Image (spheres, grey):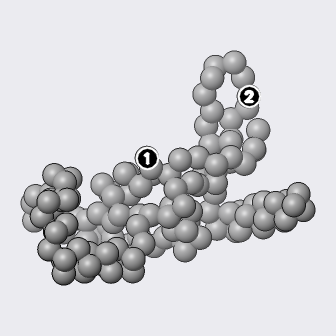
């Protein structure tokens, strides 16, 4: 109980993209430079585009709903860093048993900074 584990961030990224219309885990500055280079060369602009890159059609109601949600949401920078690395720190809240499943929650705020400090200290001590 209360074990700290690393989990895959991809399901959370998908939920966040669907709920708020924001892609997490993508570096904004690097992507813009790569897009400009591809656009100037002319080689990769149309040929490398996948069907997934095409913008999804959304109704006006959905667009306004996403804008309202995005205005209210605010994500901690330390969690954004974890999304970019593709791994999230989480705590197991359920007690161990033979059922083969566990429940838990993603660490954030003061708890996240506390455990990150502990992990850094532990990693530096082992080397």
Q: Residue beneath label 1, please?
A: 11
Q: Are marks 1 and 2 in contact (CB under 8 Å)?
A: no
Q: In which quarter of the image is residue 38?
A: bottom left
Q: Residue furthest right?
A: 125
In the displayed structure, does residue 36 sit left or right of residue 89?
left
Q: Where is residue 119 in the image (x, y as percent from the top left)?
A: 78, 60
Q: Quadrant of residue 41?
A: bottom left
Q: Is residue 30 above or below residue 102?
A: below
Using the numbered discs, state the Cα–Cα distance from disc 1 to disc 2 in whole angstroms. Answer: 24 Å
| For marks 1 and 2 on the same chain, the one whose residue lies earlier in the sequence | 1
Mark number for residue 125?
none
Quadrant (top left/top right/bottom left/bottom right) for the N terminus: top right
Which class describes the residues within 10 Å of circle 1: few (<14), some (14-19), or many (20+)?
few
Residue at image coords 87%, 61%: 127
Q: Position of residue 116 (x, y in %)?
A: 73, 64
User: Which residue is at the front of the view, 12 or 83?
Assistant: 83
**Residue ID at (54%, 61%):** 85
Q: Which residue is drawn at 64% across and 68% down?
A: 109
Say above or below: 120 vs 36: above
Secondary structure beneath label 2:
loop
For residue 37, side relative to residue 86 (left or right)? left
User: Residue 40 sits in which quadrant?
Assistant: bottom left
Position of 14 with respect to 55 (left or right) is: right
Q: Is mark 1 on a helix, strand or loop?
A: helix
Residue 58 shows in the view: no
Q: Where is residue 124 in the image (x, y as percent from the top left)?
A: 85, 65
Residue found at x 19% / y 54%:
50
Camera-side residue: 23 or 32? Answer: 32
Q: Which of 33 and 99 is in front in this view?
A: 33
Q: Nearer the viewer, mark 1 or mark 2?
A: 1
Tag 2 residue: 96
């Amino acid at each position: 109980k209360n074990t700290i584990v690393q989990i895959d961030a991809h399901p959370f990224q998908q939920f966040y993209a669907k709920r708020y219309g924001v892609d997490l885990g993508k570096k904004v500055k690097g992507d813009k430079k790569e897009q400009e280079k591809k656009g100037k060369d002319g080689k990769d602009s149309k040929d490398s585009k996948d069907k997934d890159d095409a913008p999804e059609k959304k109704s006006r109601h959905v667009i306004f709903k996403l804008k309202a949600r995005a205005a209210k949401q605010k994500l901690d920078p330390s969690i954004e860093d974890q999304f970019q690395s593709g791994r999230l720190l989480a705590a197991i809240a359920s007690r161990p048993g033979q059922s083969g499943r566990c429940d838990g929650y993603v660490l954030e705020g003061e708890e996240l900074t506390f455990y990150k400090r502990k992990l850094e200290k532990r990693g530096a001590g082992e080397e």
